[in-house]
Amino acid sequence: MKAFFLSLFLIHTTMVFPVQNTSVKDGIVPDEIVAYKTMESTKLSLHVFNPKEHKATDNAPVIVFFFGGGWSGGTPKQFYQQSRYFTEKGMVAISAEYRVNRTHGTTPFDAVTDAKSAIRWVRKHAKELGVDPNKIIASGGSAGGHIAACTGIIEGYDAADEDLTISSIPNAMVLYNPVLDTTEKGYGMTKVGEERKTDISPNHQIHTGVVPTIVFHGTADKTVPFENAKRFDLFMKSAGNDCVLVPYEGKDHGFFNGSFFRGERADEIVYADLMDKSYAFIEERVITSKEVKPARIIANHMVLQQQMNVPIGVGQMQVKW
C-alpha cells in the first residue's frame, strides 16, 4: 500500500503543467519567448505578451520595449508589467533583449543595432505574430528609451546580414526618461567616446519626418537632465514633427517603473497615470489614426540642429535659422 501511494506521489510531482501567463505569485511571465537574432554564441530573444484569445490571423498593434541600465546591464522583466497592461488594451507587447556591456562586452552602438534588428524582425514576422506591420511602437526607459528613439531617428547602424528592404523604423515612439543627448550636456559620453559623442545622440540627429513621439520625464532627474527632454521637444517641433513632452514635477530618474520591477519604491498613482497617457497617445496617433503611413527607409537628410543656435539653458531656448 505504501508503494502504491508513493507511486501516486511521484506521478503527481513529475507532471508538467503549462505556465500561467498572468500575474501570479512569482510574478508576470510572457506568453512566449522567441529568438530574433543570433551572433556566434549570443542569442537575443523577444519576450512576447499576447491579448486574450489572440490569433496569428489578428492584426493587432504592437509595442516593443527596451529596458534601461546604461547600456551596461538590465533585464526585459523591467517592462513585463507594462506589457501586460497593453495586452489588456488589445495590443501585443514585447520586451526585447539586447546586448549590454557587462554581459557581452558591447557598446551603446551595438545596442542601437540590436534595437533596429528587433523592430525589423517584428515587421518581417508580423503575420506569424498576428500584428500590423504598420502599427509598431518603439518604447523604453533610460538607455532603453535611447535605443528606442534611435530606431526612429538615427541613420545606419543596421546589421549587414539582415534584409534592409524591411524598415527598422517604428510608426510611433513612447519614451520614458530617455537618454536623448550623449554629449557632456547629457548622459553617456564616456561610453560613446568624445569623437563619436553626437553619432547616436537623438538631439543632434533630429530631422523632418520623425514618427509621432511622446516623452515622459521627471523634472528632478539627476541622471538624464530634464533640459535634454525640453530641447528634444523643441527640436522635434521645429522640424515639423509631432512631439509631446509630459513633465512630472519633482520626479527623479526611473519614476516610470511599476511595482513589479521597483517594488515598494514605485509610485502606483504615477505609474497608472503614465500607462493611461501612453495608451491614449498610441490610440490617437496609431490605432485610430488614418494618417499612419508605412514605415520608410530613412533617406539622406539634412540634420536640422546643425543650422540651429540653441542655448541649452532651461527656459532660454531660441531657434535661429
Image (spheres, helix red, strand yellow):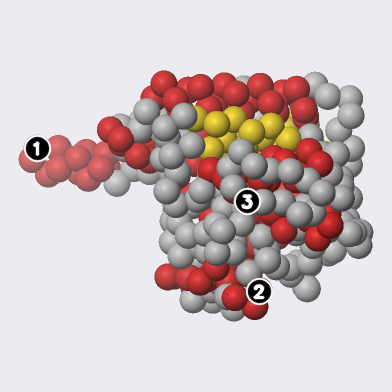
Q: Which residue is mark 3?
A: 312
Kind of residue sitting beneath label 1: Met
Categorize mark 2 by other alpha carbons within 10 Å: few (<14), some (14-19), many (20+): few
Query: Residue at (65%, 78%) from the top-left corner?
Result: 195
Distance between the alpha carbons at the discs numbered 3 and 2: 20 Å
Depicted 199 relative to depicted 313: above or below? below
Q: Which residue lies at the image location 57% right of the left edge and 21% below the top edge?
A: 276
Kind of residue sitting beneath label 2: Arg
- Counting the numbered discs, the total is 3
Q: Is residue 265 left or right of residue 225?
A: left
Residue assigned mark 2 = 196
Nearer the N terminus, badge 3 or badge 1?
1
Q: Residues within 10 Å of mark 1 (few under 14, many from 20)?
A: few
Nearest the viewer among 298 and 191 is 191
Res 56 → quadrant:
top right
User: Viewer-proximal residue, 89 or 169?
Assistant: 169
Dot 3 amino acid type = Ile
Residue 99 disc label: none
Residue 30 place in picture, x, y as percent: 50, 41
Question: Quadrant where the N terminus lies?
Answer: top left
Q: Earlier in the sequence, mark 1 or mark 2?
A: 1
> Cα distance, mark 3 to mark 1?
81 Å
Q: Are marks 3 and 1 in contact (CB under 8 Å)?
A: no
